[in-house]
Amino acid sequence: MYSAHRVDRPAQAIDIEPFGLIVHSTGPSASGVYLHHRVWEGRTHYPPPEFWDDVAQSGIGVYYMTQRPMNLRTGTLAQLPTGDRNAFDAVVRQIRARVDGGRS
């Protein structure tokens, strides 16, 4: 799973939008899931106004460099921040629903 943090400038928020796929012992699955505008605890956070002031002054626009959760390279699922862990769980639910023949 890749947990993208999308800047939603009009809402002055940052939303988690995960993409995930299954990797079987024979290789990756032929399809994956991308969760856009879903709901779970911690999905959206609202940076302080100073953040948006800095963005406007920097000229960086909507492009941000990748940042590891909690600045860790490895760890357990329990170490993920709440929003990212809930994003992971949401991706797993969607993949399992599709693999099991249902749709969620």
Image (spheres, rainbow, N blue to C red):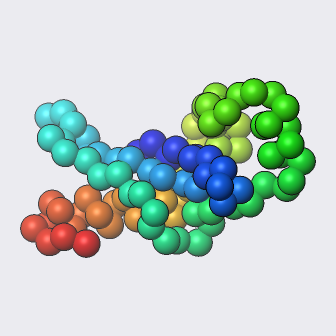
Picture quadrant of residue 73:
top right
Picture quadrant of residue 64:
top right
State the residue in front, 62 or 20: 62
79 relative to 97 in the view: left or right: right
State the residue in front, 83 or 55: 55
State the residue in front, 94 or 70: 94
Residue 64 position (above or below residue 86): above
Q: Looking at the rendering, in which quadrant would you find the C terminus?
A: bottom left
Picture quadrant of residue 54:
top right
84 relative to 33 in the view: left or right: right
* Residue in the image at 46% along x and 63% along y: 37
Residue 26 position (above or below residue 97): above
Q: Residue furthest left?
A: 101
- Please tell me how many numbered marks the rendered image carries: 0
* Residue in the image at 71% along x and 28% along y: 60
Q: Residue 90: x percent and y percent?
A: 41, 64
* Residue in the image at 80% along x and 37% along y: 56
Q: Looking at the rendering, in which quadrant would you find the N terminus?
A: top left
Q: Residue 42: x percent and y percent?
A: 62, 66
69 relative to 57 in the view: left or right: left
- Could one spot residue 78 in this view of the protein? no
Residue 6 position (above or below residue 88): above
Residue 26 position (above or below residue 103): above
Q: Residue 91: x percent and y percent?
A: 37, 58
51 relative to 6 in the view: left or right: right
Q: Residue furthest right?
A: 50
- Could one spot residue 103 in this view of the protein? yes
* Residue in the image at 67% along x and 33% along y: 61
State the residue in front, 100 or 38: 38
